[in-house]
Image (tube, rainbow, N blue to C red):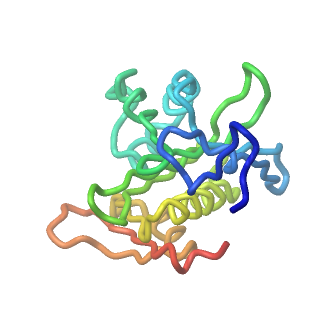
Amino acid sequence: MNSLPDGLALSPGPAPGRYPIELERSWEPAGGPTVQIRALRPDDLQRELHFIQGLSRETLYLRMQYFASQLSERDIVRLLDLDYLDRMAIAGMVGSGEAQCFVGVSRYARIEGTTRAECAVVVADEWQARGLGTELMRSLGLAARARGITCLEGSTLAENQRIAAWARRFGFNVRTEPNSGGLVKVTLDLQALPG
């Protein structure tokens, strides 16, 4: 049996509470500054609040189905309640030091007792249609699959045809929910996700 030096142990895989440093990387969009991609941390409270408050009313309504006036610091704290296993959020960031800010966030939360998770992605208005949403969702999907999740699912308003079209291109199954008042459900089989 091979032994490891004192203080070192082999990790069996992602563990709750362990910050996933392996998700940190840079992404180079066409014609834009380098985006740093990483999991959110509890100390991101102000960045997350600033990001959401900077979204247009249309983006808040179509993607998050609420307006900034309904958002409290308590809501942000809840969004940052991550265990990096059943609840994960991944951000795209630009800038450096104290000026570093979020330009997009993807997240999932496992549906208790299943291998499915609810997911969402939102991108700052000025960063939309530049590939960031796709990059964040790919990162999220690969992280979810590595943590035993087999399917991501989400919902959007039927009037949000742009996100429905994006979801189809990404590989989500997109269908209108019967008796839902106009919600479209999207599902992604993570076994089919390249990477």
Q: Residue at x 33, y 68 (%)?
A: 185
Residue 126 in sight from this viewpoint: no
Image quadrant where residue 155 sits: bottom left
Which residue appears at 52% of the width and 45% of the height? 89
Q: Is residue 113 above or below residue 189?
A: above
Question: Residue 125 or 84: which is nearer the viewer?
Answer: 84
x and y percent of residue 131 in the render? 68, 59
- 93 or 11: nearer the eye? 11
The picture quadrant where one finds residue 33 is top right
Give percent across and percent down for residue 88.
49, 47
* Closest to the observer, 193 or 125: 193
Vertical order, 111 against 15 (above or below): below
- Quadrant where the C terminus is found in the figure: bottom right
Kindly give the residue lying farthest to the front in the view shown. 1
Is 42 on the left or on the right of 76, as rendered?
Answer: right
Residue 188 image position (x, y, % from top left): 45, 72
